[in-house]
Amino acid sequence: MTLESLEAGISQSIAGNRLGDISYAVQSVAERNGFSVVRDLTGHGIGRHMHEDPPVPNFGSPGTGLLLKEGMILAIEPMVNAGGYEIKTLEDNWTVVTLDGSLSAHFEHTVAITQNGAESLTLPEEPF
């Protein structure tokens, strides 16, 4: 389900769309199938630094947020939970778990918004 949510978000990564279109697509696929999406962690912009603006939430409303423009680079990274959306970070300050102990999955791809739609920059050219 997480991969399908990611693919739905990527499909909305089109110049002229809004950031909320990506977020809504991710959330819709997950919730339509009985899952939740993490709300405390987001995808992000990619530039000279690792995690840049804009944040790319996994939930939102279509037609809202930042206008997507050709040349933008975004990391879209849904985190889909079998239970509730709440999470906590463990004492190692790295490990994230669901608050209710349910299973969770995470997928991430970095996409460039081009005149021809989204182009994944992180998909391998050859199958594994």
Image (cartoon, rainbow, N blue to C red):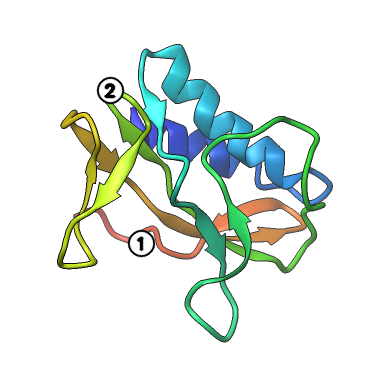
Residue 75 in view here = no
**Most foreground residue, 101 or 60:** 101
Please give the name of the residue rendered at 60% of the width and 79% of the height, measured from the top-left corner: 47
Q: Percent position (x, y) of residue 14?
A: 72, 47
Asked whether, in this view, residue 35 is left or right of residue 22, the answer is left
Residue 2 lies in quadrant: top left
Disc nearest the viewer among 2 and 1: 2
Mark closer to the chain start, 2 or 1: 2
Q: Check disc 2 and give the amino acid type.
A: Gly
The residue positioned 52% from the left and 33% from the top of the image is 26
Position in image of residue 111 (x %, y %): 55, 59
Residue 9 disc label: none
Quadrant of residue 33 within the rendered picture: top left
Q: Residue at x 27, y 47 (%)?
A: 88
Q: Which residue is mark 1?
A: 125
Q: Quadrant of the N terminus?
A: top left
- Residue at the spot x=56%, y=44% of the render? 10
27 left or right of 98? right
Per the image, the residue denoted by label 2 is 83
| Mark 1: amino acid | Glu
- Between the residue at mark 2 and the residue at mark 1, the CA separation in whole angstroms equals 34 Å
Question: Label 1 crowding class (10 Å Cα cut-off): few <14, some 14-19, many 20+?
Answer: few
Taking 63 as reference, is 50 above or below it? below
Looking at the rendered structure, the secondary structure element under dot 2 is loop
Residue 6 in view, yes or no: yes
Q: Secondary structure at mark 1?
A: loop
- 97 or 4, which lies in front? 97
From the viewer's side, name the closer residue of 63 and 73.
63
